[in-house]
Image (tube, helix red, strand yellow):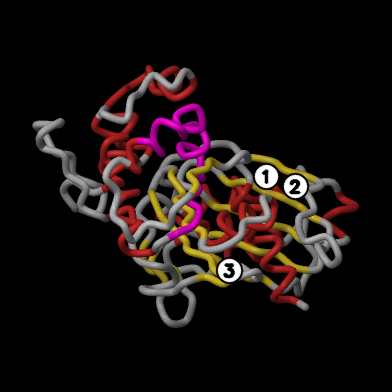
Amino acid sequence: MLLGIDIGGTSIKLAILADPVGNPANPPLYTARSKTYERPDRQRLVHVLAAALAQTPGEMQHALSAVGVCAPGLVDASGRIIKAVNVPGLEGLTPADIVSLAGQETLPHGLPVVPQTDTHAAAFDFAVTHAIQGRLLAISMGTGIGAAVLDGPDHRPLIVSGRGPGHLGQLDVALPELDANVPIGPDGGRGSLEAYMGLPALRARFGPQLGRVLEHADLHPNHPPLAALVKALRIAHAIYRPNTIALLGGVGIRLSPLIDDLHAAASRDLTGLAHPGWELRSGDSDFHAASGVARLAGQSSR
């Protein structure tokens, strides 16, 4: 069995899958979400992950053959996380370190630990479980915004900068004509996609009404956050020429009622570089990244 751990900006998600040999799209056997946190230090992060791991069924723990971990942040050449704005408790650690600290009482010793970005993992799970053909651009929208581009039948990642295709969340999509006070993102970039559509930005804009706004799709493509997203989608066609774009993550999944409107807005006078018949889709699981990193760990450990 394979364990996937997705360390997010506000909680940790777990997924356990049977080894996907012979059935690459197998669903998870077990999923769980930890208690929530906000900018946890190391002690808090280890405690939360350890508590979540302790709840996994014992027979599954003992049958694990590999662990995959999604951990946000800037990574140095040794694989150590040197900057994690939303999860500072990760700083100074490798993904293997956090698994060792949190799982010492629950996980078998010596398990191989495979690190991966959450965007790549979520994109891989979506591509495999939805039988995506052609180039996929997956945009993960949660506390932050990231992207992955996958190609070919084996869903190989496109690497342009760092460990991904670039920093789509930091694209300048400022809309001063719609929003007099152009927002500033957590990295200091004014008018970035993350400054409009990241979870902290949406909370600042909508306050306690955010859940209702997303649940009831009380947004329109001309509203500043979605207009910024549409602008990013249009730019992405010029850069990546995807056949399919998928909106993933806690925010992206909840935009599913607006997919047709967003597709229509992005398609209006779109560059001729765009693939005719391109699709815009949304994810259908909050555990795409946890499941995807488990699948990738299974591939790496064979």
Residue 64: percent from the left, percent from the top? 82, 63
Q: Which residue is mark 2?
A: 54
Q: Which residue is mark 1?
A: 51
Mark 3, other Cα within 10 Å: few <14 / some 14–19 / many ≥20: many
- Determine if the magenta segment contains residue 102: no
Mark pair 3, 1: CA separation: 21 Å
Residue 91, image quadrant: bottom left
Residue drawn at x 76%, y 74% is 110
Residue drawn at x 65%, y 71% is 154
Q: Is residue 7 visible?
A: yes
Q: Amino acid at mark 1?
A: Ala
Residue drawn at x 40%, y 67% is 165
Where 41 falls versus 263 (above or below)? below
- Marks 2 & 1, CB-CB < 8 Å contact: yes
Residue 170: percent from the left, percent from the top? 27, 55
Residue 123, image quadrant: bottom right
Mark 2, other Cα within 10 Å: few <14 / some 14–19 / many ≥20: some
Where 8 falls versus 209 (above or below)? below
Mark pair 3, 2: CA separation: 21 Å
- Depth check, mark 3 against mark 2: the one in front is 3
- Marks 3 & 1, CB-CB < 8 Å contact: no
